[in-house]
Image (tube, rainbow, N blue to C red):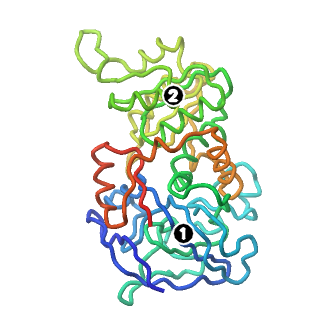
């Protein structure tokens, strides 16, 4: 079938809107009509060429929502008409990782997913007779896509596509890191580095679990108002801090430790900057502070700290997709949104058409959007 898609033909070039061909679902696969898709920094990262796993040509996009159109042989959990959210982190419930209950990182289709193909080793997309690769197993920058059944979460039908698509990545990554990875307790002090889409969701996750003090750290003062709306109690702009001699570049770590009376019980790095990762660890409370890395650093970058920071009781951990098990937890998060326990609407700052998708990435680059959503 013919579908409209934004194709990344090569790194560093704008996406091109083209009509591509999509084969129907094979065994264990599902054809989905995508109704809305968010533009995530991970898509931008791959498109830039900095992603060592980036492959081209490909149809990017991994933060979507849509409706099941057709199912392949052997699919038992979904039927045409079901509303679904694609999962770049699937949940097969049968692999060693899923059965361990220690991680959400299902390994059932990871090798082929990383090569941009379906589990049988082939692509369902083609353009002018040549294969076009899938992206993160999702490819939501097309109005139709094919995914394995284990990479789809069935959700309630009254939830708006343009809001719940964000649960396919940003919302779950942020809130999940608080609830499922770090397991923040009521009464905690939380410090969040980076108040973009992920950081704001960390903040509302911390508020949701009853954190008493939530400190946001960002060099963009324009982020403060919305962060306070989501639950932030204190705002720190590192650019406003002065060094001991009165100059710029003050001691962010020292300031945060003093501000919180010893440091954060839980800290989160949501940018992907190794310097901030170190600062987030070092401002965690001595003896018990837990620092969670969410942001994805560029290829080849490394993190470093003095061993003293760890042997004095701090812990450094990482979180992928918020530690959420997609088919199990994503429907719950949709329910939380529909029940008013979490907020998404203010985070969707721009609605775009597919033809405007490159403008969405420009808004992201300029820091003028929280999340832009393409509506099909």
User: What element does badge 2 sit on?
Assistant: helix
Q: Give the total number of marks visible in the rendering.
A: 2
Q: Which residue is mark 1?
A: 113
Left or right side of 149 for 251: left
Q: Which mark is residue 307?
A: 2
Relative to residue 173, is residue 28 depicted above or below?
below
Q: Quadrant of residue 131?
A: bottom left
Residues at marks 2 and 1, CA–CA distance in whole angstroms: 36 Å
Compared across the picture, whether 236 is left or right of 94 comes to: left
Q: Dot 1: within a 10 Å radius of its alpha carbon, few (fewer than 14), some, or many (20 or more) residues?
A: many
Q: Name the foreground residue: 69 vs 23.
A: 69
Q: Quadrant of the C terminus?
A: bottom left
x, y (%) of residue 113? 54, 69
Name the side, left or right, on which 161 lies relative to 238: right
Q: Secondary structure at mark 1?
A: helix
Q: Which mark is residue 347?
A: none
> Foreground: 346 or 139?
346
Q: Residue at x 40, y 58 (%)?
A: 43
In this picture, residue 375 sits left or right of residue 10? right
Write down the quadrant of residue 312 in the picture.
top right
Q: Residue at x 63, y 40 (%)?
A: 340
Q: Position of residue 14 (x, y in %)?
A: 27, 65
The extreme bottom residue here reads 129
Query: In the rendering, at what x and y percent does residue 229 appear?
Result: 49, 29
Q: Position of residue 322 (x, y in %)?
A: 59, 46
Vertical relation: 104 (above or below) 239 = below
């Amino acid at each position: 079938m013919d579908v409209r898609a934004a194709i990344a033909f090569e790194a560093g070039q704008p996406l091109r809107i083209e009509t591509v061909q999509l084969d129907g679902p094979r065994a264990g696969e599902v054809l989905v009509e995508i109704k809305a898709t968010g533009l995530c920094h991970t898509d931008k990262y791959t498109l830039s060429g900095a992603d060592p796993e980036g492959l081209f040509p490909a149809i990017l996009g991994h933060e979507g929502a849509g409706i099941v159109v057709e199912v392949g042989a052997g699919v038992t959990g979904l039927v045409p008409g079901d509303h679904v959210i694609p999962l770049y982190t699937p949940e097969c419930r049968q692999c060693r990782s899923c059965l361990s209950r220690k991680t959400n990182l299902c390994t059932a289709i990871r090798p082929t997913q990383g090569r941009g193909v379906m589990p049988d080793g082939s692509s369902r997309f083609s353009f002018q007779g040549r294969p076009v690769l899938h992206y993160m197993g999702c490819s939501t920058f097309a109005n139709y896509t094919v995914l394995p059944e284990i990479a789809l979460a069935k959700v309630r039908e009254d939830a708006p596509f343009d809001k719940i698509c964000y649960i396919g990545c940003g919302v779950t990554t942020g809130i999940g890191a608080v609830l499922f990875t770090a397991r923040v307790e009521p009464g905690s002090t939380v410090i969040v580095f980076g108040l973009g889409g992920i950081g704001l969701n960390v903040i509302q996750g911390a508020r949701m679990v009853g954190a008493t003090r939530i400190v946001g750290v960002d060099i963009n003062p324009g982020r403060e108002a919305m962060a306070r709306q989501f639950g932030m109690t204190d705002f720190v702009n590192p650019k406003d801090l002065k060094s001991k001699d009165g100059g710029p570049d003050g001691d962010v770590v020292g300031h945060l430790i003093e501000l919180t009376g010893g440091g954060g019980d839980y800290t989160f790095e949501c940018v992907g900057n190794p310097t901030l990762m170190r600062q987030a660890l070092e401002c965690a409370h001595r003896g018990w502070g837990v620092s969670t890395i969410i942001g994805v650093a560029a290829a080849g970058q490394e993190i470093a700290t003095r061993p003293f920071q760890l042997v004095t009781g701090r812990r450094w951990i990482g979180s992928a997709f918020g530690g959420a098990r997609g088919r199990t937890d994503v429907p719950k998060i949709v329910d939380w949104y529909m029940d008013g326990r979490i907020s998404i609407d203010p985070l969707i700052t721009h609605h775009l058409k597919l033809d405007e998708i490159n403008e969405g990435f420009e808004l992201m680059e300029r820091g003028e959007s929280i999340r832009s959503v393409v509506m099909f």
